[in-house]
Amino acid sequence: MVSQEKAGYNEYIYIGVGTNLGNRLEHIKQAAKELQSLGIRILRTSSIYETQAWGFESDELFLNTVFECVSSMKPLNCLKALQFVEKKMGRKKHLDSGYESRIIDLDILLFKDQRIQLPELTIPHLYITERQFVITPMHELTGSFFFHSLSVSFEELKSKFENPDFPFVVYNPPLVNE
């Protein structure tokens, strides 16, 4: 179990959430509850978008959303908490298979406005500027806010990916506290 840090909620964290197996909406709700039980307080959620798989072929569509959170956790402890929730929910990672279908995928997209480069953690997330299923919900939550760690706003990023066929909204907040 991951220890809960209780020094107060002072770090803004954006967590990308994806799932394409089973009852996808329930998986997202369960992940939200699990994260909150570990001391990651969810302030807002983006809409939930249904999208094609990215980086691999799959017949199963993904549901993707972003949680805007606060926590007193340090970045590596937050990563461990996310991995704990993934494992608890039944995610199995196969080291040699690359991208694959999953019950739940939790990624730290941004942690405050920090840049972190460690073997096990890169913040901002390595592909944050390339995935429209991240850019669209991040834009929904942050608008034109300029992230120094990215040197760009999600409004600017979204404008270069305008694609009328992508994505479509499946579910609107409130996801948390229902």
Image: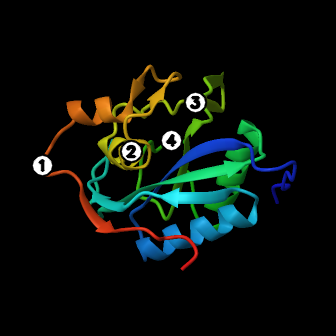
Q: Position of residue 153 (x, y in %)?
A: 39, 30
In primary-sequence order, the first of circles 1 and 2 is 2
Report the residue marked by disc 3.
123
Report the residue marked by disc 4.
96
Q: Is residue 39 above or below residue 110?
A: below
Q: Is residue 94 visible?
A: no
Looking at the rendered image, the quarter that the C terminus falls into is bottom right
Report crowding for label 2: few under 14, some 14 to 19, many 20 or more residues within 10 A (C-alpha).
many
Mark 3 vs mark 1: give the one in front.
1
Disc 2 to disc 4: CB gap under 8 Å: no
Where residue 55 sits, quadrant-wise, is top left
In primary-sequence order, the first of circles 2 and 4 is 4
Q: Amino acid at mark 4?
A: Asp
Report the residue marked by disc 2.
134
Label 4's element?
A: loop
Q: Amino acid at mark 3?
A: Ile
Report the residue marked by disc 1.
164
Tell whether 162 sits left or right of 173: left
In primary-sequence order, the first of circles 4 and 1 is 4
Label 1's element?
A: loop
